[in-house]
Amino acid sequence: MQRYILRRLLAVIPTLFFASIIVFMVIRILPGDAVDLIIKSSPFMEDSEQLRKEIEADLGLDKPMHIQYFYWVRDIVVYRDLGTSLIRETPVGPDIAERVPVTMTMGILAVVFALAISIPIGVYSAMKQDTIGDHVGRSFAILGLAIPSFWLGTMIVILPAIWWGWSPPSRLVPFFDDPFRYLSVFVTPAAILGASLAAVTMRMTRTMMLEVLRQDYIRTARAKGLSETLVVMRHAIRNALIPVITLIGLFVPYIIGGTVILERIFDIPGIGQLLLLAVQDRDYPVITGIFLMVGIFVISVNLIVDLSYGLLDPKVRDQE
Amino acid sequence: MADISGQAGVSAPKVRIGQRGRLADFTRRLFREKPLGAFGAVMCLVFLVTGLFADFIAPFGYNEMNPIDRLKPPSVEYFLGTDQIGRDVFSRIVHGARTSLIIGFSAAFFSIIISCVIGITTGYFRGKFDMLVQRMVDAWMSFPDLVVVIVAVSVFGPGMWQVILVLSLLYGIAGSRIVRSAVLTVKENDYVHAAESVGVSTIRILLRHILPNIMAPIIVLFTTRLAAVILVEAGLSFLGLGVPPPAPSWGGMLSFEGRSYMFQAPWLAIMPGLAITFVVYNINMFGDALRDLLDPRMRGSGLKQKLDV
């Protein structure tokens, strides 16, 4: 197990390195020169070759690329400095951190929702393979993959408003003022996000259940006279769900993409909304800051998922 | 397809069937064994024809305004109603099919090319080169699709070709994994070893011995990519970052500009979304059937790909 953990940790280092290179490249190719910006924003500066050189030296832009990269990483790791917003002129890091809990709440609710509906349906579908119930479940899953979340969200905002004058709760209050009110805002968007995740989970659960139910130990359990419920609950589901865990790692980028759209529709002040605002204002430090943080977050979650997968399934850890 | 017959454990009929006969044979199997997939295939054709002949099918131009007929509900004249500036919703959906078609097919096509180049070289040569590239692919895939596209649009500006470029790269790099794993199994076949031992050039091995034998997963990958690209493009246009208006796009028709009018005219919100769902659903059904018929080994692993939507 220790060797497995070590190997996984070592494999993350190049991934993090390449991810940071990607973000750094984006920063380099951004339109609009930083020097131009500084000169334009200050009325006292006369645009001259001399001044440009000075500002460049000041920002470290005269240094070779790899030195610049080194400075950039050092600023982030040592000084926790992601840059400053061009519009609000506040540091980007705290701006992002402030919105993390909102997006996290939505993501976690979506996962809970997805697992709660997909696992029972997936298990049922596998046990009643090729019956009408199975077909209905699977058709809904494929449909769930085809319906875009922004359309579902739009419909849920518009149709009930027309029919019954009802609209989903939207004003976000601080969590500690009224936890229920706070969570109620997330219920509708999280359910929409969860629905598409549920479609994938349901299909995966069904496939894994079908595979496990064909195993010898299930036959043994049945042969020794265990009730079908016990066979399914204790022997089948537990083993079938292990690979489903890896899905949660795959969900994370999908959830982050999904919240961008759903935060827009339901006007929720999370990371996605910050990103869209920044794109609108061409606030590049905020865009690249979010880009980097999202990448690091996804890599970390995948590492945790891999490690727990190894913990649960010895076969994975002994590979290679 | 009879090509997989080289695979260990897969015993395809050894009968020699001509190219045309094979296609006919495949179509027959599709309709007999996978009725839902066949329906999906037919609907994909409808989508194709709609996109190609949009000018002949749509009764109005996509930006043709009849200000007197604002927000008209569906009627005989305006099949699916009109929007806030009196444009025919049906015509805009038909023309929107063309936008989805162009972006979907180009991005899916280029992404497959990228996947093949990366997947075949890394899978065949292995070694340090493969290790390095795999870590890069890991890094690339840790950025969410939509976030990558949004950042890219903010850098390159909105527009159809920018979107195609970014989506091709995005799915091309992610899809290289699937091509690579297919290459890993194919390259252990005797005919590849035989070709290597008689000194056939590497390029020739890759193109004549490897590539034809991984066509099945590549075709399936194409259908999943097509669906994914159409969905992401719609999402992007919904956010106002896709194809700039007044060009018609299904996502754009649902965007915030029209939001306040949708309460008076719900068909504005319903119809474009139905179009997206319908097309993506049918592509998925067709893709699933293709996978089952062409490449039974991919069953199950396709799930991960679905998440890329």
Image: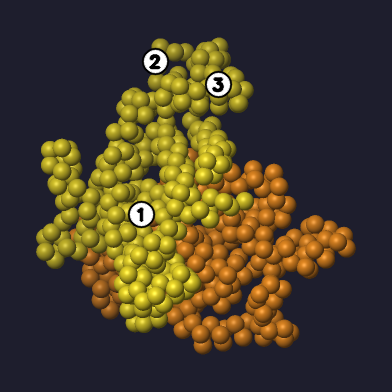
Chain colours: A yellow, B orange
Q: Secondary structure at mark 3?
A: loop
Q: Position of residue B199 (x, y in %)?
A: 87, 60
Q: Is residue A43 left or right of residue B225?
A: left
Q: Position of residue A142 (x, y in %)?
A: 39, 69
Query: Which of pointers 2 and 3 lies earlier in the amino acid sequence?
Result: 2
The chain identifier of the residue carrying mark 1 reads B
Q: Which residue is mark 2?
A: A43
Q: Which residue is mark 1?
A: B238
Q: Which residue is mark 3?
A: A61
Query: At 70% from the left edge and 51% from the top edge, which residue is drawn?
Result: B126
Contact flag, marks 2 and 1 (Cβ < 8 Å): no
Query: At 58% from the left edge and 52% from the top edge, which residue is drawn?
Result: A319
Query: At 72% from the left edge and 83% from the top edge, which residue is drawn?
Result: B14
Examine the rendering and report whether any part of residue A145 can be seen.
no
Where on the picture, by quarter, is residue A197? bottom left
As drawn, the residue found furthest toward the front would be: A224
Q: Is residue A220 left or right of residue A95?
A: right
User: How far apart, in angstroms, are the residues tagged by discs 1 and 3?
Assistant: 38 Å
Discs 2/1, front: 1
Q: Amino acid at mark 2?
A: Pro
Crowding around mark 1 (Cα neighbors within 10 Å: few <14, some 14 to 19, many 20+) is: many
The chain identifier of the residue carrying mark 2 reads A
Position of residue B204 relative to residue A28, above or below, is below
Q: Amino acid at mark 3?
A: Leu
